[in-house]
């Protein structure tokens, strides 16, 4: 019990300097170029293979089933 109080007390005294990433809006051409560049990386290749696999298709099918409900909830949160 005392230890957790010390952790919270210590947490409040720490000051971290974090740099905020710049939020530059990309054009469609820049977005496409960045995506093509990423798809050429090993992670992008692996993702494309997963998308084409039965597991990936199953995930996308499940997403399509619940997407309608997700949109309704998103509309509620805007109010």
Image: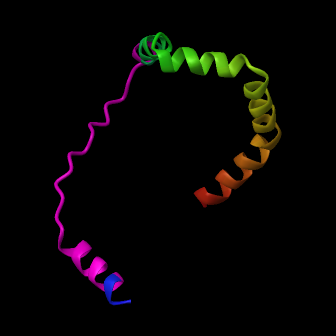
Q: Quadrant of the C terminus?
A: bottom right
Which residue occupies 47% across, 14% down? Answer: 32
Q: Quick check: is 44 in the magenta stretch?
A: no
- Image quadrant where one finds the N terminus: bottom left
Q: Nearer the viewer, residue 77 or 8?
A: 8
Q: Nearer the viewer, residue 10 or 17?
A: 10
Residue at position x 80%, y 30% from top? 58
Q: Height in image: 30 above or below 69?
A: above
Residue 36 falls left or right of residue 15: right
Q: Would you identify the image quadrant in which residue 31 lies?
A: top left
What colour scheme was applied to this rendering of the protein? rainbow
Q: Is residue 17 magenta?
A: yes
Segment tinted magenta in the rendering: 4-30
Rendered location of residue 56, percent (x, y): 72, 26
- Tally of numbered discs: 0
Across and down, in percent, residue 65 comes to 83, 39
Task: Looking at the picture, tell me which residue is in the foreground, 16 or 63.
Answer: 16
Quarter location, residue 4: bottom left
What residue is shown at x 38% (from left), y 24% (from top)?
26
- How far across and down, in percent of the image, does residue 67 sit? 75, 41
The residue positioned 65% from the left and 16% from the top of the image is 49
Q: Nearer the viewer, residue 47 or 20?
A: 47
| Residue found at the far bottom of this picture | 2
Residue 50: image x %, image y %? 66, 22
Q: Is residue 38 above or below residue 10?
A: above
Left or right, 62 with reference to 37: right
């Amino acid at each position: 019990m005392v230890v957790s109080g010390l952790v919270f007390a210590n947490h409040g005294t720490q000051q971290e300097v974090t740099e905020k990433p710049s939020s530059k809006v990309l054009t469609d051409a820049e977005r496409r170029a960045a995506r093509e560049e990423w798809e050429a990386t090993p992670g992008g290749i692996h993702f494309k293979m997963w998308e084409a696999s039965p597991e990936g298709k199953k995930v996308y099918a499940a997403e399509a089933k619940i997407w309608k409900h997700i949109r309704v909830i998103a509309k509620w949160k805007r109010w």
